[in-house]
Image: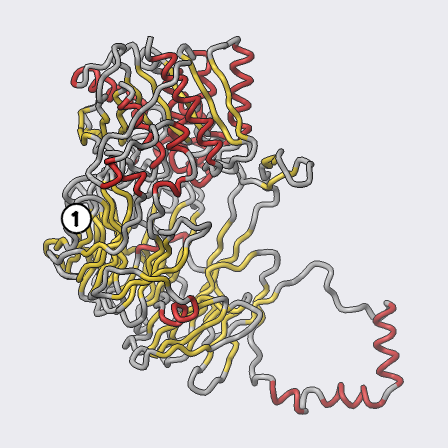
Amino acid sequence: MKKFYLFFLLGTTAASAQQTQPLTVDYIMRDQKWLGTAPSNYRWSGDSKTVYFDWNPENKEKDELYKVQIGSTKPVKADLKLADAAIQPEYTYNSDRSLGLTEQGGDLYLFEVKQGRKIRLTQTLERETNAAFLTDGSVAFQRGDNLFVLNHRTGELKQLTNFVRNKKGETKPAADSQDGWLKKDQLELFDVLKKQKKAEPFGFRAALIPEKPLRAIDLKEAALNGLAVSPDARFITYRLVSMPDKVHQTVVPAFVTESGYTTDIPGRTKVGGPLPVYTPYVYDRERDTVYQIQTAQIPGIKDLPDYLKDYPEKLEAAKRKNADRAISLFGPFWNQKGNIAVIAARSQDNKDFWILKLDAATGQLSLIDRQRDEAWIAGPGIGARGIFWIDNQKIAFQSEASGYSHIYIADVVAGTKKQLTNGKWEVKNLQLSADAKTLYFSGNIEHPGISHFYKIGVQGGEPVRITSMKGGNEVTLSPDEKWLAINYSYMNKPWELYIQENKPGAQARQVTASTSAEFKAYQWKEPEMVSFKNRYGDDVYARVYPAVKPHPSRPAVVFVHGAGYLQNVHYWWSQYSREYMFHNLLADQGYTVIDIDYTGSAGYGRNHRTGIYRHMGGKDLTDQADGVKLLVEKYNVNPAHIGIYGGSYGGFITLMALFNESDVFASGAALRSVTDWAHYNHGYTANILNEPVNDPIAYKRSSPIYFADKLKGNLLMAHGMVDENVHFQDIVRLSQRFIELGKNNWELAVYPVEDHGFVQPSSWTDEYKRIFKLFETTLKK
């Protein structure tokens, strides 16, 4: 193969005056510290005067802790002990926000806001969790399987629950057993033991026993989950989790080990495996009674999913059974007054999400909001974690009812709902101000690929944009809410820290400068932001890297990003930084490159998100082919010289492209690819394809292994052998299919020490040399 060299274009910096190292695959894929290390993990001091962050401007082995004062743009290294005392943890506050609670290292700390003083409440070997203030000012927390209340003023500690476990084999010794005989003999022999036994109910030990012992609640074989207490300490809510008897865990073998022996890494289950059963309860301490939360009354609990219409026998069987669907409950979430609680529920078939009002005294539930999606419930901010109280009567949450994830306010008492934001854009990272008058959020109002920080009053109105830099703005708000620590980047400029006053139009001051002279010496390209109509009439967005000087063959490469609700067509620095640099290299070598936010990508609303339901490799694949049509029509590429590549979901699409769009794609590189969705995990796959045993149609039309016979172009596959996400077994099974089919236009590169996300620069280098060689030899004919 010929050697190709790409020289840095002259920049505007001093380094540009010198000739620099040619930009090759080896150069790009080495240890990524050569770019410079961006700052991360921003934390504010409790007084809102200092930002702490992790950074590595000196290119050391590890990041170090830095800080910068408000009003300064010169970060300095921070003293770890002083920083630990100064950094503001995430506190749970009491009603007037005079006190805060936090957990650090498994112990509880109390923060006195006015005094700025942190007081340690516990120092135990056991971990204290789920700390919250009760209405009387005391602190409730969980230790082990039980709840306790601590009066931080007096130091009095009280146990609220007595969960016990009836362990198998633990019985009292029988009277005729050896231990039983010894016990009886001891009592007959010694007067002192007789006296102690008679005195126990009336002596000193009895004085320590409460007048009414705590009810023992037997957990039996179930796991305890979701333990919580109402603010008045009357109601204890919890879930018992029954695990399935037979759970078949996968195993990932590790071949390159220190011992020289192959070791097995315990893996995940596969989609469709048995799921835990959650049963919710209330323990009423006042009445000393335990009762189950009544989930059977949830509206739509028996509703069947539409996809069963494709299986008439299964549909009729389900109708006859008329069973309640399995659900998972989250919460309850109590208002500060402690008189109203809401619970979130999600059906295990992924079609419904409910917000419900709980009558804790009876276990009865009433509906506040129901989100039903015949595909699957998801979207940014949607779920139990996105629910919070605005006041003692209203809650805020997010819903895709309008087609995009927006903010809603529900009056739990009046039974009314109000949509606060609206439009063809999405709300992310919603949070409430300390005075409960303002909601802050990130949104892509201006463009799907531009993220800004906004605020809106809890009563509604137009959102007010606070940040102003075009690109990606990830904001960490100071405790006093007067300042923003902004993690900002642009498409050809990696992330840096900026500080801005929390005012619209205020200037953001850059604090860090992380990129190296080497990085800045090359004029990294700003890809063209375009959109096109796919064959279904939907808008699809893409980034295009036009060839600097098109090769005579006029080749093009399609890059397919991964999934998990992700986008890559945006104005900020890509998480695919190596691929971004590789696209610069390809463009300088005469290729045109396109990167598409195909159907299923984040940022475009419910219809785009769920467009792959029951058919992965459907619209998400044809979007790639429609993007090629755009390149042919507007960028003069040769339709006979099109390549495609991507990793994980991108690898899956690459396989489907080589199998089902073989007239469009001449070659492809499929990296760490899913080849059969029935072998992937449950949490992701069951959302989109349901379960294999219930919806085999979806799996048969979505899994590349069933289309392996259609391979025509040249295929490179690359996979880590210790991949704990997409198992190496996936690619081995597809390879066996190729062997049995007699296919010879494929090759497999294996990486013995790599997991799903490659770590070793040598692996990245080897992989991308192979990709580059594939395109050079198949697309430049």
Please identify the quarter of the rendering in which residue 574 is found. top left
**Relative to the observer, which residue lies in front, 529 or 514?**
514
**Relative to the observer, which residue lies in front, 339 or 554?**
554
Q: Is residue 457 left or right of residue 161?
A: left
The local crowd at label 1, few if under 14, some if 14 to 19, many if 20 or more residues have their Cα within 10 Å, is some
Note whether 72 is above or below 22 in the view shown: below
Note whether 632 is above or below 727 in the view shown: above
Determine whether the residue tagged by mark 1 lies in a helix, strand or loop: loop
Q: Residue furthest front?
A: 18
**Relative to the observer, which residue lies in front, 285 or 591?**
591
Pinpoint residue 317: horizontal percent, then vertical percent. Answer: 46, 33
Please state which amino acid type lies under the numbered disc 1. Answer: Met
Note whether 471 is above or below 466 in the view shown: above
Note whether 745 is above or below 557 in the view shown: above
Count all numbered tags in the image, as a single digit.
Answer: 1
Pinpoint residue 274: horizontal percent, then vertical percent. Answer: 53, 41
**Relative to the observer, which residue lies in front, 83 or 234?**
83
Q: Is residue 407 visible?
A: yes
**Residue denoted by label 1:** 469
* Quadrant for the C terminus in the image: top left
Indicate the colouring scheme: secondary structure
